[in-house]
Amino acid sequence: MREMSVDMWVNVAASVLAAAACVVFVATYHLHASWWRSEVGRNLMGFAAAVGMLCLYTVLVTVWPTGCVAILLRAIRTVVLLAVAALMVQRTRLLIKAQREYRDRTGV
C-alpha cells in the first residue's frame, strides 16, 4: 500500500468514513426501531447495509487489488450492486404506493 498516490488515500479514507457512517446507522436503527416490521424499514436497513458494503469493497480491493481475494471481492460487489438495484426498484414502488395513498386521502 506504500505505492498509493494521494488521491487513492483520499478515496480509501472517504470510503472508510462512509462505511463507518453506514455501520453507525445500521446499528442505531437496529437498536432503536422495529425496522423489520415494515417494508420501508427493511428497505432503509438493506440500502444502508448495501452502501456500507460497497464502501468496504473499495477499502478491501485497495488492500488486495489482485489475486483470488480480488476476484472474490469483485463477485461480491456484483451481488451487492444487484441488491442496490433491487432495493431502488422496491423504493420506487414504495414511493408510488405512498403517493397514491396520499392522493386517495386528500382527494387530489
Image (tube, rainbow, N blue to C red):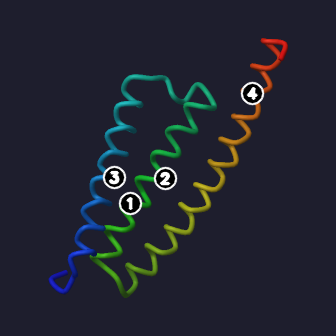
Reading the image, the residue beneath label 3 is 18
Residue located 42% across and 57% down the image: 53
Residue 44 on image: x %, y %: 52, 37
The crowd level at tag 3 (other Cα within 10 Å; few <14, some 14-19, many 20+) is some
Q: Which mark is residue 50?
A: 2
Reading the image, the residue beneath label 4 is 99
Q: Amino acid at mark 4?
A: Gln
Disc 4 to disc 1, how far (Cα)? 32 Å
Residue located 49% across and 23% down the image: 34
Q: Are marks 4 and 1 in contact (CB under 8 Å)?
A: no
Give the residue at the far top of this rendering.
106
6 sits left or right of 101 in the view:
left
Q: Amino acid at mark 2?
A: Ala
Disc 3 to disc 4, how far (Cα)? 31 Å
78 sits left or right of 88 in the view:
left
Of callouts 3 and 2, which one flags the residue occurring earlier in the amino acid sequence? 3
